[in-house]
Amino acid sequence: MEKKEEKKGGCFCKQEENQFYWSDKLTCDQRKKVLEVCQELWGEKNKKEKASQLMSIMYIETNKTFSPSVDNG
């Protein structure tokens, strides 16, 4: 599947339509998952905006690390 995506216009993560705020902090698989979850919750039209908002919240909640082990309390 990866090879098909590359032939259609490059890596999934490099395509402009798959970029969102803080996406450069994620692996390609993580970006795909964030966009998938946001699309499922808020629809195709809103997925990038909501992905950016979700990542901004995660940035704050993890003390700028995006690490799930960080205690924000």
Image: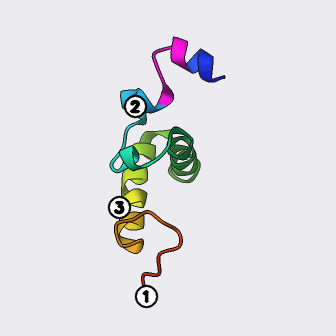
Residue placed at 48% from the left, 24% from the top? Answer: 11
Q: Position of residue 60 (x, y in %)?
A: 35, 70
Of the image marks 3 and 2, the number of the one nearer the N terminus: 2
Tag 2: Cα neighbours inside 10 Å, few (<14), some, or many (≥20)?
few
Contact, mark 3 vs mark 2 (Cβ under 8 Å): no
Q: Position of residue 31 (x, y in %)?
A: 49, 43
Residue placed at 36% from the left, 29% from the top? Answer: 16
State the separation of the CA atoms marked 3 and 1.
18 Å
Q: Nearer the viewer, mark 1 or mark 2?
A: 1
Q: Nearer the viewer, residue 48 or 10?
A: 10
- The range drawn in magenta is 6-12
Where does label 3 land, which residue? 56
Outermost residue, right side = 1
Where does label 2 land, which residue? 17
State the separation of the CA atoms marked 1 and 2.
35 Å
Q: Nearer the viewer, residue 34 or 45?
A: 34
Mark 2: secondary structure: helix
Residue placed at 42% from the left, 65% from the top? Answer: 58
Mark 1: secondary structure: loop
Q: Does 55 lie within the magenta span?
A: no
Q: Nearer the viewer, residue 67 or 54?
A: 67
Where does label 1 land, which residue? 73
Amino acid type, callout 1: Gly
Of the image marks 3 and 1, the number of the one nearer the N terminus: 3
> Tag on residue 63?
none
Tag 1: Cα neighbours inside 10 Å, few (<14), some, or many (≥20)?
few
Contact, mark 1 vs mark 2 (Cβ under 8 Å): no
Quadrant location of the N terminus in the rendered image: top right
Amino acid type, callout 3: Ser
State the separation of the CA atoms marked 3 and 2.
19 Å
